Amino acid sequence: MTSVDMHVDAYLSRIGFSGSPSRSLHVLRSLHTCHLLSVPFENLTVHSGGRVQLDPPHLYEKLVLQRRGGFCYENNSLFAWLLTQMGFQVTLLSAQVKNQTTGFYGPPFDHLVVMVTLDGQRWLCDVGFGVPGFRTPLSLDTRGPQEQGHRVYRITEQRNERSGLLFLEWQKEENGGEDGDWTEIYKFTLDPRRTEDYAEMCQFHQSSPCSFFFCKSLCTILTPEGRLTYIGRRLTTTTFPREGSGLETSTRDLQGDEIPGVLKEKFGIVLKSPLIPKDEPMTLLPVIY
């Protein structure tokens, strides 16, 4: 385990939060957005000869001191630590992401998300997801549409079964209101979990050809205008719709020797070991969830 002092102030500085660190919904929303704008969602450790470790001091050193990012187990675990230190009531939850190609879900503990209970209200937080991710926490006590900019999300319950399953849905880059075309992102329950519960799936995502994270080198971050995404040997710039214009996306191919500079310039990431770019198709899981 890494020996390092963990400081809330340094974490807040890392994500660019300059407000008063009070325990309020306004602060929670601000922390969530600041995190997404500052800490990339990335798996570059897996593709540069390292292994992801989930002990808090190691995560702090990586995300705060080294100014790296991580995937869900890293970003959301450390975000949960920060919120706990600031006095928020935090619960780790297990989610299963839906594969948009096959229509099947990942295994249990496929994804780590965070629930915050504040003044009797429950909020879903997720600073460890990619393109479909939401900018600010979503209410877990609301079943109707929740608008965020040009996007809209909702959380629904499984019908005709007392399974406790909830589904996060969105309308991609559209907003057709209640009757729009909804697409499931992931399913989850409110059962409390511990960090060690995710250890097996964390290893799966670093070693299995059935995992997106093993098959593709990835780094993506929310920007004030949209999103930047690196995968394999491509860099995609997305600009969200503005008044008078729709969603704009541009992609450029990268040469191998360009990639370290792109990661440094666009994402603020400097790797200690050479990256092996990867963008291979996934193998289907032998079990259907």
Image (tube, helix red, strand yellow):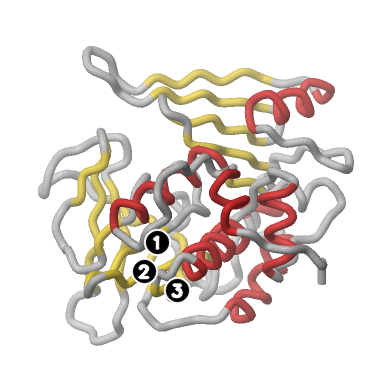
Seen from the viewer's position, the closer of residues 251 and 142 is 142
Q: Which amino acid, by three-letter code, is at mark 1?
A: Tyr
The relative height of residue 247 versus residue 110 in the rendered view (above or below) is above
- Sequence order check: which comes first, mark 2 or mark 3? 3
Q: What residue occupies the far front of the structure in this picture? A: 20
> Residue 285 placed where, x, y %?
59, 66
**Which corner quadrant holds the N terminus?**
bottom right
Discs 1/2, front: 2
Q: Which residue is pictured at 36% across the width and 26% down the height?
A: 240
In the structure shown, which secondary structural element does the residue marked by tag 2 occupy? strand
Q: Which residue is pictured at 58% across the width and 46% down the height?
A: 41
Q: Which residue is mark 3?
A: 93
The relative height of residue 14 versus residue 204 in the rendered view (above or below) is above
> Residue 102 placed where, x, y %?
47, 55
> Residue 110 placed where, x, y %?
54, 68
Q: Which residue is mark 1?
A: 186
